[in-house]
Image (spheres, grey):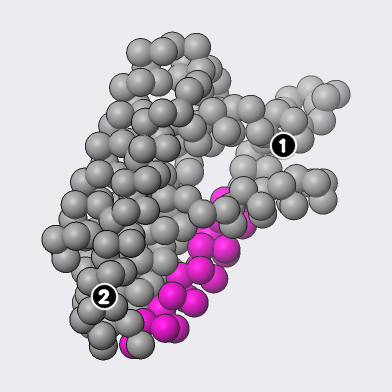
Amino acid sequence: MSLEFLITSLIIVASPGTGMIYTVAAGLSRGARASIVAAFGCTLGIVPHMLAAIMGLAALLHTSALAFQIFKYLGVAYLLYMAWNTLQERGALQVEQKVDTRSALRVTIDAVLVNLLNPKLSIFFFAFLPQFVSADAINPMPEMLALSGVFMLLTFVVFVVYGLFAASVRSHVISRPQVMTWMRRIFAGAFVALGAKLAVADR
């Protein structure tokens, strides 16, 4: 477990992306508990990509233009759906005073899908992990699983920090309807921008 891997992973995790934006939105609209649930869901959404990379399935997305395009546009469609729901006050920035079991499940599912429907994440693992696996490793799988576990832990911790910070200023935001209106527009715009970025992404 090199320092270079930890620093690189931290930079990647802390960079703004769909998961981070969704976690912040959850913290602002639903509070601290929801932000932790969202961070957990986004972390869960990494697992299929990690397994795909370790098992070599990510190679399919890397080599098959059709598979990549299908997966990519599913992700774009979901981000646009998130943007629309946010503007309609029933999506990422739906204000709720408390998060019950049903709400927590919905937050988790949305968070998982946000990261799951992003083919670039699989290819990232496919290209990123092997660089930090020992060249002389007889069986690289345990090492890749360990590195992936650390990456997921960093993701969860950083996203929780983002979410809890958002939750800490929640009362100042939701008490001002005009601020919430602009926040919804900003977050909807962010989802659209990330969708557009994904739409033009190459393998």
Q: Which residue is mark 1?
A: 143
Q: Nearer the viewer, mark 2 or mark 1?
A: 2
Query: Is residue 199 one of those drawn in magenta?
Result: no
Of marks 2 and 1, which one's residue comes earlier in the chain? 1
State the extent of the magenta-drawn residues as a range. 150-171
Residue 144 vs residue 180, the one in the foreground: 180
**Quadrant in the rendering for residue 53:** top right
Which of the 4 image quadrants contains residue 170?
bottom left
The answer to whether residue 108 is seen in the rendering is no
Q: Amino acid at mark 1?
A: Glu
Say left or right for 88 vs 155: left
Looking at the picture, how far across and down is residue 56, in whole percent? 55, 20
Q: Looking at the picture, does residue 49 appear above or below residue 203?
A: below
Mark-to-mark CA distance, 2 and 1: 45 Å
Circle 2: residue type: Met
List x then y, in percent, for residue 69. Answer: 35, 21
* Res. 37 image quadrant: bottom left
Label 1 secondary element: helix
Q: Position of residue 180 (x, y in %)?
A: 26, 75
Q: Is residue 167 visible?
A: yes
Callouts 2 and 1 close, C-beta under 8 Å: no
Residue at image point 67% right, 34% down: 129
State whether the magenta stretch is mostly helix, strand or loop: helix
Magenta-drawn stretch contains 151: yes
* Residue nearest the observer in this picture, 14 or 58: 14
Residue at 27% x, 62% y: name it.
185
| Residue of label 2 | 180
Query: Residue 59, how many percent across, how many down?
Result: 53, 17
